[in-house]
């Protein structure tokens, strides 16, 4: 694969003759398979070669030795370069710029290597000697999933920043006054539900500290959460005319437009969640029987839908003229390198992008906006809440109750009469 990008025999001999020759060949093949442009290959290969020489000079013998030299090489690279740019990048920006290709190379050639990637920046957690045991408690005793534990980390990091600023480093320094100050200072800008979640995480942590005798009394009672009410809001749906406008502005002449059009139709026709669209595979579309299967729903069940001709044609157009040629069975893929399967975040961004392009104004627009719009359409058609809940995959009937607030015709009947017929 190297000969596709490097034509001079001397260059090929130098690349293949290095101690990273075979892994470099694999990495370049991976870049080609995932749709990277030639300019990306020309940028990454010299970086990997210099990294190999740097590690070799510091006694690296095998690929397994390379991860230990990443940090040192990043600083070495930054210090030796003459960054003559109109806008001088920050040192942290340079670290990300050079670390990315190296960690990508190591992930390709070392299956167990993870690296930092583009993960959210970690901030210090409070009480570092206690926190590992607390996170283990959440995972092993409370049975929380990694995504939920990450949610805990976000709130605990905010607590850590607050306590560090006050120079409080021991659990014994916690008090109702300190906890009240933390909630008061960090609440502005947060929704009521987010403040409630922060208070809940804090109470769990405080109960753990008391249980393991890090603090003499249970301070969780000193943390009060704001009062929130179920069904207090209304679904953030858009009108069907706005849906038509959104679909009409999608440019289907390009591959990205064909992909986005199919995604938008799936969201608004079947009310799928963004994660459900992201996990669809080629095997979930039964062309012979005209069925669409959604096997990995939030409630742990699956649903089979009739395949709408409009949706089917949009998916077929994308498969024939937009989807990259890959052995991966996922239905939707990114359109820029690396050509990996689309994630729930990508699906949400697609929905938000086209809603904005159509001039639609709605709070917190995303894939769930179109899910709410699908349900609103079913409510307007007179379907029962039970039928609607089954259609969109709600686990519990209470999840569908909020849509009774936008059932305009039924509400009008209640307002104009005594309501007995509705009851």
Image (cartoon, helix red, strand yellow):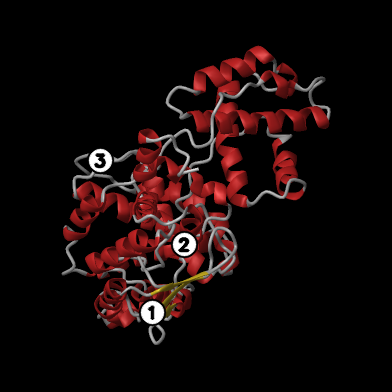
Residue most extreme to the top: 177
Residue 124 visible, this orientation: no
Q: Quick one: 11 or 390, which is closer to the camera?
A: 390
Mark 2 neighbour density, 10 Å: few (under 14) some (14–19) many (20 or more): some
What x and y, as percent, mark residue 24?
Answer: 43, 73
At horizontal 61% and vertical 34% (from top left) the residue drawn is 125
Judged by depth in the image, the label closer to the viewer, 3 or 2, is 2
What x and y, as percent, mark residue 3?
Answer: 30, 82
Of pointers 3 and 2, the one earlier in the residue sequence: 3
At horizontal 77% and vertical 47% (from top left) the residue drawn is 141
Q: Which residue is mark 3?
A: 361
Label 2, secondary structure: give it: helix
- Real-space Cα separation, disc 2 to disc 1, in angstroms: 32 Å
Label 1, secondary structure: give it: loop
At horizontal 45% and vertical 44% (from top left) the residue drawn is 421
The label number, if any, that marks residue 188 in the structure image: none
- Real-space Cα separation, disc 3 to disc 2, in angstroms: 27 Å
Q: Which residue is mark 2?
A: 391
Which image quarter: residue 342?
bottom left
Residue most extreme to the bottom: 288
At horizontal 23% and vertical 39% (from top left) the residue drawn is 87
Disc 3 and disc 1 in contact, CB within 8 angstroms: no
Q: Is residue 214 left or right of residue 122?
A: right
- Quadrant housing the N terminus: bottom left
Judged by depth in the image, the label closer to the viewer, 3 or 1, is 3
Of pointers 3 and 1, the one earlier in the residue sequence: 1
Q: Quick one: 207 or 5, which is closer to the camera?
A: 207
The label number, if any, that marks residue 326 in the structure image: 1
Which image quarter: residue 363?
top left
Of pointers 2 and 1, the one earlier in the residue sequence: 1
């Amino acid at each position: 694969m190297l000969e596709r990008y490097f034509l001079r025999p001397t260059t090929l001999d130098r690349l293949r003759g290095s101690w990273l020759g075979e892994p470099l060949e694999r990495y370049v093949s991976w870049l080609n398979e995932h749709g990277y442009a030639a300019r990306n290959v020309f940028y990454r290969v010299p970086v990997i070669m210099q990294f190999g020489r740097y590690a070799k000079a510091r006694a690296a013998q095998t690929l397994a030795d390379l991860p230990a030299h990443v940090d040192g090489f990043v600083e070495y690279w930054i210090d030796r370069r003459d960054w003559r740019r109109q806008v001088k990048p920050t040192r942290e920006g340079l670290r990300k710029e050079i670390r990315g290709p190296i960690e990508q190379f190591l992930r390709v050639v070392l299956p167990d290597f993870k690296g930092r990637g583009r993960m959210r920046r970690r901030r210090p957690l409070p009480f570092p000697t206690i926190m590992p045991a607390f996170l283990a408690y959440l995972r092993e005793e409370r049975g929380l999933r990694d995504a939920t534990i990450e949610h805990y980390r976000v709130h605990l990091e905010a607590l850590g920043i607050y306590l560090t600023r006050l120079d409080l480093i021991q659990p014994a320094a916690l008090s109702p006054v300190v906890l009240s100050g933390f909630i008061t200072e960090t609440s502005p800008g947060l929704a009521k539900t987010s403040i409630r979640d922060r208070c809940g995480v804090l109470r769990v942590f405080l109960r753990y500290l008391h249980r393991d005798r890090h603090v003499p009394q249970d301070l969780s009672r000193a943390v009060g959460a704001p009062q929130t009410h179920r069904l207090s809001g209304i679904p953030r749906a858009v009108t069907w005319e706005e849906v038509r406008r959104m679909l009409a502005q999608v440019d289907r002449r390009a591959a990205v437009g064909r992909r986005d059009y199919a995604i938008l139709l799936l969201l608004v026709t079947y009310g799928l969640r963004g994660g459900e669209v992201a996990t669809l595979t080629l095997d979930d579309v039964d062309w012979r029987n005209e069925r669409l299967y959604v096997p990995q729903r939030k409630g742990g069940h699956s649903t089979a839908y009739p395949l709408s001709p409009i949706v089917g044609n949009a998916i077929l157009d994308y498969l024939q003229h937009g989807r990259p040629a890959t052995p991966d069975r996922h239905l939707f893929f990114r359109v820029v390198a690396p050509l990996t399967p689309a994630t729930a975040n990508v699906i949400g961004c697609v929905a938000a992008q086209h809603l904005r392009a159509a001039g639609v104004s709605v709070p917190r627009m995303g894939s769930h906006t179109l899910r709410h719009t699908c349900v609103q359409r079913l409510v307007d058609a007179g379907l029962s809440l039970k039928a609607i809940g089954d259609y969109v995959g709600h686990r519990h009937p209470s999840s569908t109750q909020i849509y009774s607030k936008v059932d305009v015709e039924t509400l009008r009947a209640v307002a104009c009469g005594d309501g007995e017929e509705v009851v």
